Amino acid sequence: MATLEGSKNDVSINLFDPEVQQCPYDAYKHLRDDAPVYNIPGTEMYVVSRYDHVREVLMEPQRFPSSSADTPFRASAGNIERGEMVAARFAEKGWVPAPTLNGRDDPNHKQMRAMFNQAFKPSRIKEIDPLVENLAYDLIDGFAADGNCEWVKQFCVPLPLFIIGEQMGAKPEDMWRIKRWTDAFFQRISLMLPEDQHMEMVDREIEAQQYFQPIFERLREHPDDSLISVLVNTVIEEWGRPLTDNELHAEMMADTFVGGSETTTNALAAGMKLLIENKDVWQQLKSDPDKYMRTFIEEVVRLESPVQSLMRFVAEDTELAGVAIPAGAMINIRFAAANRDERAFECPEKLDLDRPKAGGHMGFGSGTHHCLGAPLARRELIWGFTAVVDRFEDMWFAEGKNDFTYHPHFLLRSLKELHIEFEAKR
């Protein structure tokens, strides 16, 4: 058990418990108050939950690096033996995913990030913006006459998935196949799967690799102006080469499709749920969307943090909040706990459209690994909820159809489904 500086009680919190994951916010408060740096019993994993401490970890990448060279796959597979099985399966049937952008440290990270910054530069996001706007309205118009929908499947999934899919060279008719593959990656990194299901998800990911490999090869022969062509063909100057197939396959799942769609999907679902639960906020947002929309988006990301946490390592023996942490240990930085820290936010559990400096949350991380896709995610959220304001007079939960359950996951927060009914604007 972890006994904390200034704490008289032992603390026992199990963030791997699916029941805790359904609504983890009481557990996060308990950790912030009594165990801000919490050693999960029986492991070398330390959960960091206060805003200032999370920021400290993120802003000191030399002290808390993103990778640990002697333990490949440790963060994604939970243990070394499982990780070796995963690597062997990828090697046998597909391509072993190389470390992703999030799993690299400088100077390697900075060199690779420069190429991604080129791919996601503001002018490119601006070019995509009309596609996002049109798709948001088209999706709602597709079910507006019904007066009801399953919000996650009919809106939250296709909006970001179709946008990133088009940028990644996928055919429109293949989008739901791709969703099955991104779901596999989502589950594989959950740290919640038994071995047989874990390996099944690996096999699904390999299907995705076989789908995208011919696209890589075609774009090497015939580059175009798509985002994926930039990723395939840009030579990283310091490396003297573009990304390898192994690097590209890793990025396709982690930083483009899952990073670029799954997290936005979950924010769109969370935002609708929050609006229905907070009708005063809905009325305020409708009264002046130009004034309140951006703050609303930031509050959704802060309150429900689609990325609940990520991993870092400890380079050498160190101390954080009075707790000694050995070299080689893992740090689980809990963005979602930091985003509700009373020390950083007044009334943190409240959805407040008048919150000052609403963008000061950790929902997109901070420091050198600040979320690459944040500008695109914000545009998708803004257009998604602008379409809601323009098309819906009011909306409510469909009676008897929702259990409001979340997928079991140690790192991400994802509502399974959300059945709503609505009154469309005339």
Image: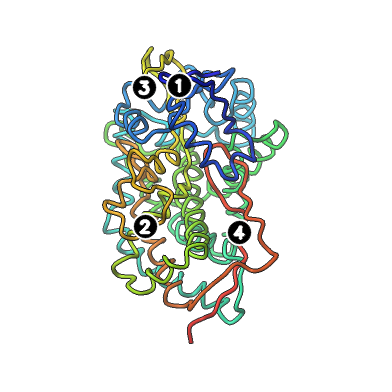
Q: Nearer the viewer, mark 4 or mark 2?
A: 2
**Residue at 48% over, 48% down:** 306
**Residue at 35% over, 65% down:** 293
Taking the image as drawn, is residue 224 in sight?
Answer: no
Answer with mark 4 or mark 3, whichever residue precedes in sequence. Answer: 4
Marks 4 and 3 close (CB-CB < 8 Å): no
Q: Quadrant where the N terminus lies?
A: top right
Amino acid type for the residue under numbered disc 1: Ser
Query: Based on the displayed image, in which of its 4 quarters is residue 297 positioned?
Result: bottom left
Residue receiving disc 2: 352
Q: Nearer the viewer, mark 1 or mark 4?
A: 1
Residue 197 or residue 378, whichever sits in front: 378
Marks 3 and 2 close (CB-CB < 8 Å): no
Dot 1 crowding, Cα within 10 Å, few <14, some 14–19, many 20+: few
Which mark is on residue 164?
none
Residue 293 or residue 341, whichever sits in front: 341
Q: Give the answer, above or below, for where 363 lies relative to 326.
A: below
Amino acid type for the residue under numbered disc 4: Trp
Residue receiving disc 1: 7
Dot 4 crowding, Cα within 10 Å, few <14, some 14–19, many 20+: some
Q: Secondary structure at mark 1?
A: loop
Which mark is on residue 176?
4
Furthest residue toward bottom:
426
Q: Give the answer, above or below, for where 172 lies relative to 229.
A: below
Amino acid type for the residue under numbered disc 2: Asp
Dot 3 crowding, Cα within 10 Å, few <14, some 14–19, many 20+: some
Q: CA distance from mark 3 to mark 2?
A: 30 Å
Judged left or right of residue 157, residue 322 is: left
